[in-house]
Image (tube, rainbow, N blue to C red):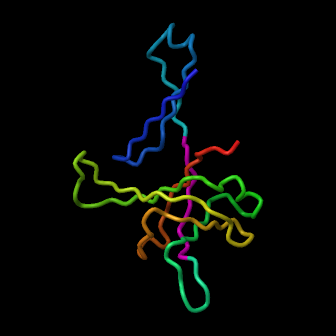
Amino acid sequence: MYVRLSYNLANFSPFTVTVHSAHTMTADKKTSGQPVRLYVNGAILGYKRNMRSQHNHTSLIKIKGVDSKEEVEFYLGKKIAYITKVKTADRNGCKFRVNWGKVCRAHGSNGVVKCRFSRDLPPNSIGKKVRVMLYPSRV
């Protein structure tokens, strides 16, 4: 049994997972599974801060459906994608850019998490959506 993942950023479609077993592949190679969403939506609340200063290297993300510190435990270490659309296409013709991050720890007891991104999130991203991917798995 193997799993094939495909991801199409061109039209913001979620991941498509196709699961095949060994006997299915020999009998019929045209089988296709149902698309499965491998992410949870989240919202960017702002940066880590204290009373007088803010630290742009750590962002606060509210994950949809997570309302306690215990539920945050599942999302620790998961990847986060902040997707933006740009004017100029890259060499592959894609007009989308992805800034990848990772869930580091909980922030408070309401299901907010602290995340670090490969590049700091821009200020205009506050209030926008992110995708919290359901991988890598820690199970």
Task: Using the image, determine if residue 65 lies above or below residue 106.
Answer: above
User: How many marks are shown on the rendered structure?
Assistant: 0
Left or right? Give the position of 96 relative to 87.
right
Q: Position of residue 82 (x, y in %)?
A: 45, 60
Q: Residue furthest right?
A: 70
**Residue at the spot 23% in from the left edge and 54% down from the top edge:** 89
Q: Position of residue 78 (x, y in %)?
A: 59, 52
Residue 100 colored magenta?
no
Task: Report the span colored magenta.
Answer: 37-47
**Residue at the spot 53% in from the left edge and 65% down from the top edge:** 116
Q: Position of residue 47 (x, y in %)?
A: 54, 76
Task: Using the image, determine if residue 52 lies above or below residue 90.
Answer: below
Residue 42 colored magenta?
yes
Main secondary-structure element of the magenta-colored stretch: strand
**Residue at the spot 42% in from the left edge and 40% down from the top edge:** 7
Instruction: Give the quarter of the figure containing the C terminus.
Output: top right
Task: Using the image, determine if residue 109 lies above or below residue 103.
Answer: below
Residue 86 in which image quadrant: bottom left
Residue 96 in which image quadrant: bottom left
Q: Position of residue 113 (x, y in %)?
A: 63, 66
Q: Residue furthest bottom?
A: 52
Instruction: Give the quarter of the figure containing the N terminus.
Output: top right
